[in-house]
C-alpha cells in the first residue's frame, strides 16, 4: 500500500485469553463504520495458551488461570480476520514465547514481536518491549528456559537491561508498544484518581522509568500500553518539538475502553471515535 493511501488499524488492551471478544468487538466496528482494519496491535497479557502446559508456565494466581480462546486459533479452528501483532505482558506462557525471543508467527496471522522487536506495517514502524519492570533483577539475565518449573514463573515476566538496550537500538519508531505505562504521564490534577490504584500508591509512581526512557529516545508518534486495566490519554512533548500521544487501554473484559482505532493518512496519524 502506498504511503498516500488512508488506512485504519486498531489497538487493543490486555486480552487475557478473550480473543473471541476482541475479534467480535472489532469486526462489529468494521461493519458499523464500513471501514476495514489493516492490522491490530496488542499491548501484552494476550495469553496465547496452546494447551494446559502453557497455562501452567504462566505467572498468575490459580483463580486467574484459564486456557482461553487461543487454542482454537492455534489449531486453525478459528482465524483472525486481520494480522495481529502483540508483545508479552506479565501474564503470558513465557515457556512458549521464549522459544521465540526474536518474535514469531504463533498462529496464522498472529505475530509475537519478541522480547524487543520491530515490524514495518504499511510504512509504519511498530516497535515493542515485552514484560514489566523489576529493579532488583534488572541488570541480571533471565533464568534459561531449562529452569522453567524450578525457577518462579514470575522471574520470566520482567524485561531486563539487555531487552531495553535492544529496544533502544531499534531506531526510529512510529508506534511503540509497552505493557506497563511510561512514568511521568499522569497530570497532577488527575493524580487523585490514581490513589489506591494497584501498583500505584501515588501519581508519580504510576509506570516505570525504562518505558519512559524508550518514549523519550524513540519519540514515537503513538505509544500504546495496558497493564493497569484503565483507559487514559496523555501527551509527552519532546525537546525538539516532536510529541508522543500516549494511549493507555483497559482490558477486553471491561469492554469498549479496551479498544482504540487510528486512521493513517500519509504522515498523519489520528485516533478516530469508535462510537457513532
Ligand atoms: Zn492484565
Image (tube, rainbow, N blue to C red):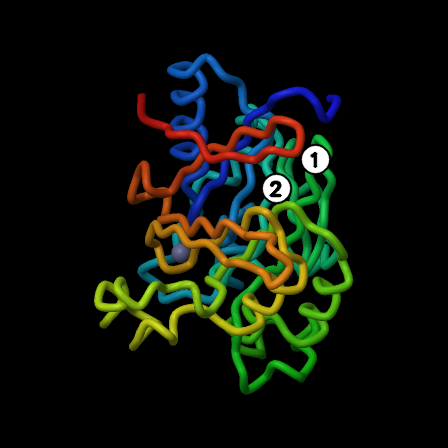
Left or right of residue 210: residue 100: right
Q: Nearer the viewer, mark 1 or mark 2?
A: 1
Residue 110, horizontal then vertical, whole percent: 62, 37
Mark 2, residues whose alpha carbon is within 10 Å: few (<14), some, or many (≥20)? many
- Would you name the residue on which mark 2 appears? 85
Q: Residue at x 72, y 44 (%)?
A: 119
Residue 30, horizontal then vertical, whole percent: 45, 19
Residue 96 in sight here: no
Image quadrant in which you'd find residue 201? bottom left
Contact (Cβ within 8 Å) of mark 1 with mark 2: yes
**The one of 92 and 14 positioned closer to us in this rendering:** 14
Residue 69, horizontal then vertical, whole percent: 45, 39
Q: Residue at x 59, y 47 (%)?
A: 221
* In the image, farthest residue toward the bottom: 136
Marker disc for residue 121: 1
**The one of 98 and 172 positioned closer to us in this rendering:** 172
Mark 1, residues whose alpha carbon is within 10 Å: few (<14), some, or many (≥20)? few
**Is disc 2 placed on a helix, strand or loop?**
strand
Marker disc for residue 8: none
Q: CA distance from mark 1 to mark 2?
A: 10 Å
Question: Residue 50, relative to residue 213: is it above or below?
Answer: above
Amino acid at each position: 500500500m502506498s504511503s498516500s493511501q488512508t488506512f485504519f488499524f486498531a489497538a487493543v488492551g490486555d486480552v487475557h485469553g478473550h480473543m473471541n471478544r476482541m475479534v467480535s468487538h472489532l469486526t462489529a466496528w468494521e461493519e458499523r463504520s464500513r471501514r476495514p482494519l489493516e492490522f491490530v496491535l496488542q499491548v501484552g497479557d494476550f495469553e496465547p495458551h496452546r494447551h494446559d502446559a502453557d497455562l501452567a508456565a504462566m505467572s498468575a494466581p490459580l483463580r486467574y488461570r484459564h486456557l482461553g480462546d487461543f487454542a482454537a486459533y492455534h489449531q486453525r479452528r478459528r482465524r483472525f480476520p486481520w494480522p495481529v501483532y502483540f508483545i508479552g505482558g506479565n501474564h503470558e506462557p513465557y515457556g512458549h514465547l521464549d522459544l521465540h525471543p526474536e518474535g514469531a508467527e504463533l498462529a496464522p496471522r498472529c505475530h509475537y514481536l519478541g522480547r524487543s522487536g520491530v515490524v514495518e506495517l504499511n510504512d509504519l514502524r511498530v516497535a515493542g518491549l515485552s514484560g514489566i519492570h523489576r529493579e532488583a533483577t534488572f541488570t541480571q539475565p533471565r533464568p534459561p528456559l531449562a529452569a522453567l518449573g524450578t525457577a518462579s514463573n514470575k522471574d520470566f515476566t520482567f524485561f531486563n537491561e539487555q531487552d531495553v538496550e535492544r529496544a533502544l537500538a531499534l531506531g526510529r519508531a512510529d508506534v511503540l508498544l509497552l505493557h506497563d505505562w511510561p512514568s511521568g504521564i499522569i497530570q497532577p490534577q488527575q493524580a487523585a484518581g490514581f490513589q489506591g490504584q494497584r501498583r500505584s500508591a501515588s501519581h508519580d509512581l504510576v509506570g516505570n522509568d525504562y518505558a519512559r526512557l524508550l518514549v523519550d529516545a524513540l519519540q514515537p508518534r503513538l505509544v500504546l500500553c495496558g497493564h493497569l486495566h484503565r483507559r487514559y490519554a496523555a501527551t509527552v512533548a519532546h525537546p525538539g518539538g516532536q510529541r508522543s500521544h500516549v494511549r493507555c487501554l483497559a482490558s477486553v473484559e471491561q469492554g469498549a475502553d479496551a479498544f482504540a482505532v487510528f486512521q493513517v493518512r500519509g504522515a498523519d496519524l489520528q485516533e478516530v471515535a469508535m462510537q457513532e
